[in-house]
Image (spheres, helix red, strand yellow):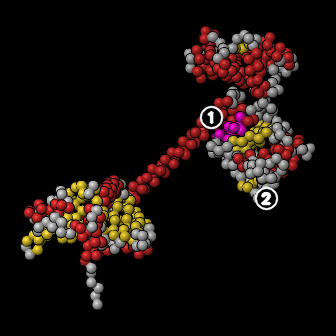
C-alpha cells in the first residue's frame, strides 16, 4: 500500500510563515511558523478577519484586483519581514488569497551572499580574460563550457565554434590535433603536451578540478605559445652571456685596482705582474718568493682578483703567527668535543671557508713539519679531515704560498718537506728587493706622501736632500720600510718641508754611505740620476692628473714649481 502524504503536516513544517484567507477575508489556514511570528495560537487565528490579525495587510487589494504583490518589506509583530501576497484562482474566479512572510535578515543575507558570488564571478571573469595565455574549460564529461579571448586570438577560432561541443567532436572536425580533457578526466591527473594549432606550436597544461567526492567536474587547459617561450629562452641566454662578460670585466677591474697599488717602473717587476695575470687564469699553485716587505701579499691578492674565483673568499693565513695546536684547528677546523674548550657545535676551518676561493699561506716556511703532511694531503687530494673528525671533506681551493726564506736550503736541512716544496713550487714568482729597483723609490715616495697628505689634509713635501738619502739607502725592509718611514716622518714633523736633519734623528742607519752603489758614488752621476727620476715622476703624475694644480697637490709642492720643472724638462703642457 502506497504511503499517503499528510499535507497539513507539510504545511506546518514550512519554514516561512503562511496565512490563507477566503473571499470574505477570513483566515482559513495558518501554519505553525505564522502563529509563532504573531505570538498567537493557530486555533485562535482561524476565523479572524485578516485586518484584525494584520492591520496593514494588503490582501483586500489582492482580492479586489487579482494582482499579486511580491517582495514588499513590512513590519509585522515588531519584526522586519519580506512578504508575497498572491490571489487563489479556482474555476476561473478568485476564491481567496495567500500571504507568505520571510525574515528580512534571512533575505538580506541571501542577497548579500548572492552579491558576493556575483562579485567573485566578475573577478574570475576579469582574471581569465586578462591573462595572455589561452584558457579552455570543459565540464566533467568533456564538453567545452568556456574559452577566453586569448585562446581565440591564439588559434583564430571563435568561442561559438567551441562552446557546447565535445572535445572528441572538435578533434574529428580538425579544430584540434590532439585532446587532453578525456585523458585528464579518466586519470584525474595533470597532463602536459604540445600541439600545433593555427601554425603555432603550443604547450598545453590540463588540470582536473575535483569535487568533494573526488569526481572530475571541470578540466582547465592552459595554452602557451612556445614561440614566445623560445624567444624568452634566447633572451635569457643572451643575458647570461652578457652577465659572463660583465663578470669578466668586473674581475679585470678588481684586479686592476690591486695592480694600481703595485707602483713600479721597473721592467723586472712589470714582467712579474704580467706573469701573475697569466697564472691567475689557471688553478696552479703559486709560490711567491722575496724578502720581507717586497709586496708578496699584494701579488697574492692580484692573482685572486684576476682569477675566476674573484667573487669567492680570499683567506690569508700567517703560518708563523700562532702556536702549532691552534694553527691546526684554525686551518682544518674541529669537531664537537675534539679538545678541551672546543665549541659544542664544532668549527669550520679556514680551508673550508676558502672553498671555491683562494687560500694565501703567508710565511709558509714557518709551518710545523707535523702540519706539512696534512697540508700536502689537502693540496694533493683536495680533501681534509677536521681535528677529532672521522670523515673527509672535499675542498676546492686555489693555493698561493709565500716566504722570505730559502726553502731549498730548508729542504736540504730537513726543516721543510721535499714533497710539499715541489707541490708548492709549481709556479715560482720571485719579487726583487727595492735596492734592485731604485727607480721605483721616487714613484713609491710620491705615492705614499700623497696618500698621507690626502688622509690628513696636509701639504707636506720632501726636500731633495732627503730624497737623495732615500735613493742611497738600501732599504732592508723594502717597500714596507719605505712606507713606514715616510709615514713616521710626515706625522712627527711640525714643518711642511721634510729635510735631511729628520733622517739623521729618526733613522741613524741612513747616515752610513756603505750601501751606496758605485753608480751613485759620483755626485754628478747622482744629480743626473735624481733629475732623471724627477722627470719620470713629474711626467707620470702630470699625465695622470691632467693639470699643474692637481700635480702640485699630488707632489706636495707649489703650482709655480711644477710649471718651472715642466719647462726645465721640456714636458709639454
- As drawn, 39 above or below 93: above
Residue at 18% across, 69% down: 47
Position of 138 relative to 529 (above/below): below
Element assignment for label 2? loop
* Magenta highlight on residue 303: yes
Decide which of 142, 402 is in the foreground and name it. Answer: 142
Span highlighted in magenta in the image: 298-306
Q: Nearer the viewer, residue 334 or 43?
A: 43
Q: Is residue 514 left or right of residue 469?
A: right
Task: Tell me which corner region of the image, top left, top right, bottom left or bottom right, holds residue 9.
Answer: bottom left
Residue 287 image position (x, y, % from top left): 77, 42
- The correct choice, above or below, for 530 with respect to 144 in the image is above
* Mark 2 Cα shell of 10 Å, populated few (<14), some (14-19), many (≥20): few
Name the residue tied to disc 1: 256
The answer to whether residue 520 shows anywhere in this view is: no
The image's mark for residue 390 is 2
**Furthest residue toward front:** 44
Q: Quadrant of the N terminus?
A: bottom left
Amino acid at each position: 500500500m502506497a504511503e499517503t502524504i499528510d499535507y497539513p503536516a507539510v504545511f506546518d513544517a514550512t519554514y516561512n510563515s503562511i496565512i490563507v484567507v477566503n473571499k470574505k477575508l477570513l483566515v482559513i489556514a495558518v501554519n505553525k511558523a505564522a502563529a509563532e511570528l504573531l505570538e498567537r495560537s493557530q486555533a485562535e487565528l482561524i476565523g479572524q478577519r485578516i485586518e484584525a490579525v494584520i492591520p496593514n495587510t494588503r490582501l483586500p487589494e489582492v482580492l479586489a484586483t487579482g494582482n499579486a504583490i511580491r517582495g514588499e518589506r513590512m513590519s509585522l509583530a515588531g519584526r522586519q519581514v519580506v512578504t508575497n501576497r498572491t490571489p487563489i484562482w479556482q474555476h476561473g474566479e478568485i476564491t481567496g488569497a495567500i500571504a507568505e512572510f520571510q525574515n528580512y535578515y534571512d533575505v538580506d543575507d541571501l542577497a548579500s551572499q548572492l552579491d558576493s558570488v556575483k562579485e567573485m564571478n566578475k573577478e574570475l571573469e576579469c582574471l581569465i580574460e586578462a591573462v595572455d595565455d589561452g584558457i579552455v574549460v570543459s565540464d566533467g564529461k568533456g564538453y567545452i563550457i568556456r574559452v577566453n579571448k586569448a585562446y581565440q586570438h591564439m588559434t583564430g577560432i571563435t568561442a561559438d565554434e567551441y562552446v557546447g561541443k565535445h572535445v572528441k567532436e572538435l578533434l574529428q572536425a580538425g579544430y584540434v590535433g590532439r585532446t587532453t580533457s578525456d585523458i585528464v578526466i579518466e586519470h584525474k591527473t595533470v597532463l602536459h603536451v604540445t600541439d600545433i594549432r593555427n601554425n603555432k606550436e603550443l604547450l598545453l597544461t590540463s588540470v582536473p578540478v575535483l569535487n568533494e567526492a573526488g569526481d572530475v567536474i571541470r578540466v582547465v587547459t592552459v595554452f602557451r605559445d612556445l614561440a614566445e617561450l623560445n624567444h624568452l629562452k634566447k633572451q635569457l641566454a643572451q643575458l647570461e652571456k652578457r652577465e659572463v662578460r660583465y663578470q669578466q670585466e668586473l674581475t679585470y677591474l678588481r684586479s686592476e685596482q690591486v695592480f694600481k697599488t703595485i707602483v713600479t717602473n721597473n721592467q723586472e717587476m712589470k714582467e712579474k705582474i704580467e706573469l701573475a695575470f697569466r697564472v691567475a687564469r689557471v688553478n696552479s699553485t703559486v709560490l711567491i718568493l722575496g724578502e720581507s716587505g717586497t709586496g708578496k701579499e699584494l701579488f697574492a691578492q692580484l692573482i685572486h682578483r684576476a682569477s675566476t674565483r674573484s667573487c669567492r673568499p680570499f683567506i690569508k693565513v700567517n703560518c708563523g703567527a700562532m702556536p702549532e695546536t691552534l694553527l691546526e684547528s684554525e686551518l682544518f677546523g674541529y669537531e664537537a668535543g675534539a679538545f678541551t674548550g672546543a665549541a659544542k657545535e664544532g668549527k669550520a676551518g679556514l680551508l673550508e671557508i676558502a672553498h671555491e676561493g683562494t687560500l694565501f699561506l703567508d710565511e709558509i716556511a714557518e709551518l710545523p713539519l707535523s702540519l706539512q703532511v696534512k697540508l700536502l694531503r689537502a693540496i694533493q687530494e683536495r680533501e681534509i679531515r677536521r681535528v677529532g673528525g672521522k670523515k673527509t671533506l672535499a675542498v676546492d681551493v686555489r693555493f698561493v704560498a709565500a716566504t722570505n726564506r730559502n726553502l731549498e736550503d730548508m729542504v736540504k736541512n730537513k726543516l721543510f718537506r721535499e714533497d710539499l716544496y715541489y707541490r708548492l713550487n709549481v709556479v715560482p714568482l720571485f719579487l726583487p728587493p727595492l735596492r734592485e729597483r731604485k727607480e721605483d723609490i721616487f714613484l713609491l715616495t710620491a705615492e705614499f706622501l700623497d696618500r698621507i697628505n690626502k688622509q690628513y689634509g696636509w701639504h707636506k713635501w720632501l726636500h731633495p736632500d732627503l730624497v737623495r738619502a732615500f735613493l742611497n739607502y738600501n732599504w732592508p725592509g723594502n717597500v714596507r720600510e719605505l712606507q713606514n718611514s715616510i709615514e713616521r716622518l710626515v706625522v712627527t714633523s711640525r714643518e711642511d718641508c721634510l729635510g735631511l736633519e729628520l733622517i739623521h734623528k729618526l733613522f741613524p742607519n741612513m747616515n752610513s754611505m756603505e750601501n751606496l752603489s758605485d753608480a751613485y758614488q759620483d755626485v754628478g752621476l747622482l744629480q743626473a740620476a735624481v733629475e732623471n727620476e724627477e722627470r719620470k715622476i713629474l711626467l707620470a703624475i702630470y699625465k695622470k692628473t691632467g693639470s699643474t694644480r692637481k700635480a702640485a697637490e699630488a707632489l706636495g709642492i707649489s703650482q709655480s714649481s711644477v710649471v718651472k720643472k715642466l719647462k726645465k724638462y721640456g714636458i709639454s703642457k
